Image (cartoon, rainbow, N blue to C red):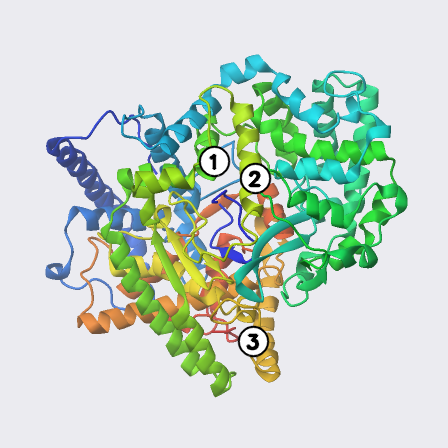
């Protein structure tokens, strides 16, 4: 069941213009459509020539940095669509900056000045703009009155949105909806004898509490999940992994309790407890202990840098032997076999396990020390921590008062000062749990069906280009080269959406166990959590369905899944600046083409290369080839690790954690430019020039590639990206990749002394 959570074997492209000012009331007439299009096109043409007038002298000085630009006027595209594309391209440029000195500033400088970061987000990028447009469409279709022939699952999706958007009713209920949950969990100790408290130490049972939390998809100590077996991609298996945290990542805890961000986290925990009527003195002391415990837990988890080798994370063990390998003190109130067996016996899961059931342990160092850490704290502190973790996740489902409590914390961690617009939060939430139902509405409203075929053609061209790069590779032996090409041919592609979502019967069957009322939002949330937890576990004995997407159509992202050897491009990303059937091929290849190449290359990055064509974790490269690959990759680690992030006061990037994405960025760009030039050769001539644009289509390819990554970040967002992110900031996704591109330097005639054309270039693919 699609539930919005990325699996551990899946990589995605990104970590995250004009909004509609009307609500759709019905289909527009042809005259209305024509007038709207004509108005937009006319405005775009005007903008193009205004921008040209302002920048004409600047562009004369640049002289397009080398390549011949626009040819005669007879070879210029004068359609409204070309005018719109030209306007968008030119309006972001800062032509005061030479392309060969800082291409990111050249391509994005004006965009960055014009697009101030909204108060409710920590960064604002071109991805943000596209996502906002998608959110507007989601809002429109969710608020459109239910139709008689709507599938039941669509009705439930709209009910969920209605319950979420009704802030007045949510406020009126206060904390009352949480009391049933707290009672089920045995009470929150910090609350004392107040409602929701009444915790009894003599009845405390860690096994039962962790089980009850997991029923709501909450895993604060043990991340148990069912997923495809990495070494046999046709079946599923149980995994045990270390947990995530209340703050964004383990590194946030490593500077001690006096760190301002840790202090903001502690204050939030204390404020929430007090809002539940905890005694202030008790809340301060108890939440101090909670943060100490969480800090100790963070310190025994594996570093992200040590978790990039999937072979080291694949440690099979029989369930009955867990107690021997990961000793549990007699007073810990926990039993491994009992916990796992009871999890898989949850009503709706109902899977029986033999004692020799194989479990994959992905965090041996963590589980070896977990009970040692827990043993240092009273049971009350452990219970307070575990229940705090689920309550922190539920703050967003309560009234406005709780949103206000998070202000200081969000300011410290993310730099934001106001909550997101409620309708955006609600639309995104519906997309998490009813992504296919909402996707049905989205594709009917906004998706160009012909985009599928054109994208598929591009995928074939990109796959061929990757094969050429493999052939030209100098560090692979012939046997490994042949296997790599075979794996590339086996990559499945998924574009747009799953066809069955347009079939009412099939869609309702998919969501048959999901339901949502139009008023009780908190109860809807708990129901969704329970159902998604059950669905994530109950398929243990089922064969893997390699046709299940696991992603919503209205998603602005792209994915590669290593155990399925599959690339996926939801409908949400197939729009400008990434893709449009009416913009030039140079822009499409610089946009979605690079994205396609990026996802293909993920199959051959430092982790993707460990899986064979069938998605099985297997060493199919020789030791010698692996060592040569690591040598090539080290160049990228050093290059990106030396970049200083200006928004983070010059903090250096993490070249290890971002390695996979950097390999994919560099390979994807190279493949897409090659595929574009092959397309031009097949066509027999260059494309028509965009009106008023003095850049060649080779240059436009690189400009559009860069403009995909235009953005602004707050200091807190930049620090977050460095501490926890696997993606480089957009600035360095442009600079780092283009510094390694000989194609780019030729297109802009960059001399050897320029910043964008260093002598040393890194290349893996």
| Nearer to us in this view, 282 or 327 | 327
Q: Position of residue 166 (x, y in %)?
A: 47, 19
**Pointer 1 with pointer 2, Cβ within 8 A:** yes
Residue extending farthest to the bottom is 478
Q: CA distance from mark 1 to mark 2?
A: 10 Å
Q: Which mark is residue 348?
A: 2
Examine the rendered structure and indicate whether residue 520 appears above or below residue 722: above
The residue where tag 1 is placed is 513
Label 1 or label 2, whichever comes before in sequence order: 2
Look at the image and tell me whether residue 604 can be seen.
Answer: yes
Which tag, 3 or 2, sits closer to the chain's start? 2
Q: Sort mark 1 into few (<14), some (14-19) or many (20+) by Cα contacts within 10 Å.
A: some
Rendered image quadrant of residue 465: bottom left
Residue at image position (84%, 49%) is: 328
- Foreground mark, 3 or 2, reads 2
Residue bearing mark 3: 632
481 w.r.t. 588: above or below: below
**Helix, strand or loop at disc 2?**
loop
Q: Is residue 2 above or below residue 565?
A: above
Considering the numbered disc 1 on the image, is that residue within a helix, a strand or a loop? loop
Q: What is the C-alpha distance between the residues marked 1 and 3?
A: 49 Å
| Image quarter of residue 258 | top right
Q: Is residue 262 visible?
A: no
Crowd around label 3: few <14 · some 14–19 · many ≥20 (10 Å): some
Q: Is residue 633 left or right of residue 481?
A: right
Q: Position of residue 21 (x, y in %)?
A: 30, 27
Q: Nearer the viewer, residue 94 or 518?
A: 518
């Amino acid at each position: 069941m699609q539930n919005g959570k990325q699996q551990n074997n899946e990589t995605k492209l990104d970590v995250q213009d004009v909004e509609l000012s009307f609500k759709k009331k019905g289909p527009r007439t042809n005259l209305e459509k024509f007038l709207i299009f004509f108005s937009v096109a006319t405005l775009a043409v005007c903008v193009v020539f205004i921008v040209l007038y302002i920048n004409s002298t600047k562009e004369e000085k640049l002289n397009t940095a080398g390549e011949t630009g626009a040819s005669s006027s007879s070879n210029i595209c004068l359609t409204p669509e070309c005018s719109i594309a030209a306007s968008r391209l030119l309006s972001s440029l800062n032509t005061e900056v030479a392309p060969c000195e800082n291409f990111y500033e050249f391509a994005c400088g004006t965009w960055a000045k014009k697009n101030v970061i909204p108060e409710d987000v920590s960064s604002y990028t071109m991805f943000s703009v596209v996502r906002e447009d998608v959110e507007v469409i989601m809002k429109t279709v969710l608020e459109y009155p239910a139709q008689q022939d709507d599938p039941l699952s669509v009705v439930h999706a709209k009910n969920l949105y209605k319950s979420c958007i009704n802030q007045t009713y949510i406020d009126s209920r206060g904390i009352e909806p949480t009391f049933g949950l707290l009672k089920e969990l045995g009470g929150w100790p910090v609350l004392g004898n107040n409602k929701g408290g009444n915790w009894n130490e003599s009845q405390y049972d860690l096994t039962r509490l962790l089980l009850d939390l997991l029923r709501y998809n909450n895993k604060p100590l043990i991340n148990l999940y069912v997923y495809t077996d990495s070494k046999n991609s046709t079946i599923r298996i149980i995994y045990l992994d270390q947990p995530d945290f209340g703050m964004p990542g383990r590194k946030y805890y490593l500077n001690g309790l006096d760190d301002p961000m840790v202090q903001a986290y502690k204050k939030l925990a204390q404020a929430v407890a007090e809002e539940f009527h905890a005694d202030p003195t008790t809340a301060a002391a108890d939440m101090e202990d909670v943060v100490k415990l969480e800090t100790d837990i963070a310190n025994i988890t594996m570093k992200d840098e040590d978790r990039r080798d999937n072979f080291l994370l694949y440690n099979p063990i029989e369930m009955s032997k867990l107690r021997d390998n990961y000793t549990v003190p007699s007073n810990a109130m926990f039993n491994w076999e009992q916990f796992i067996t009871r999890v898989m016996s949850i009503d709706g899961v109902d899977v029986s396990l033999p004692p020799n059931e194989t479990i994959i342990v992905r965090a041996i160092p963590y589980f070896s020390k977990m009970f040692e850490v827990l043993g240092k704290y009273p049971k009350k502190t452990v219970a307070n921590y575990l229940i705090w973790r689920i309550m922190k996740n539920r703050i967003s489902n309560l009234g406005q008062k709780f949103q206000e409590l998070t202000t200081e914390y969000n300011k410290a961690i993310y730099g934001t000062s106001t909550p997101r617009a409620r309708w955006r939060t609600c639309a995104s939430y519906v997309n998490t749990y009813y992504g296919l139902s909402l996707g049905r509405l989205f594709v009917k409203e906004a998706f160009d069906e012909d985009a599928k075929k054109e994208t598929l053609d591009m995928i074939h061209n990109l796959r061929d280009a990757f094969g050429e790069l493999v052939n030209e590779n100098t560090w692979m032996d012939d046997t490994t080269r042949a296997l790599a090409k075979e794996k590339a041919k086996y990559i499945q592609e998924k574009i747009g959406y799953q066809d069955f979502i347009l079939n009412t019967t099939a869609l309702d069957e998919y969501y048959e166990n999901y339901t949502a009322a139009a008023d009780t939002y908190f109860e809807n949330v708990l129901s969704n959590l329970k159902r998604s937890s059950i669905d994530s576990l109950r398929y243990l004995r089922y064969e893997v369905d390699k046709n299940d997407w696991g992603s919503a159509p209205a998603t602005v992202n792209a994915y590669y899944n290593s155990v399925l050897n599959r690339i996926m491009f939801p409908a949400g990303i197939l729009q400008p600046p990434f893709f449009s059937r009416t913009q030039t091929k140079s822009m499409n290849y610089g946009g979605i083409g690079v994205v396609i190449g990026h996802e293909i290359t993920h199959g051959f990055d430092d982790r993707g290369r460990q899986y064979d064509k069938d998605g099985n974790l297997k060493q199919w490269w020789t030791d010698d080839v692996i060592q040569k690959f690591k040598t090539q990759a080290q160049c990228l680690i050093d290059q990106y690790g030396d970049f200083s992030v200006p928004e983070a006061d010059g903090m250096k990037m993490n070249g290890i954690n971002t390695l996979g994405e950097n390999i994919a960025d560099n390979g994807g760009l190279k493949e897409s430019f090659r595929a574009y030039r092959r397309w031009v050769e097949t066509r027999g001539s260059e494309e028509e020039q965009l009106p008023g644009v003095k850049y060649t289509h080779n240059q436009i390819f690189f400009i559009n590639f860069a403009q995909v990554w235009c953005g602004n970040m707050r200091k807190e967002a930049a620090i977050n990206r460095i501490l926890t992110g696997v993606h480089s900031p957009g600035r360095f996704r442009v600079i780092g990749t283009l510094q390694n591109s000989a194609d780019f330097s030729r297109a802009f005639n960059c001399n050897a002394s320029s910043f964008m054309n260093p002598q040393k270039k890194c290349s893996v693919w």
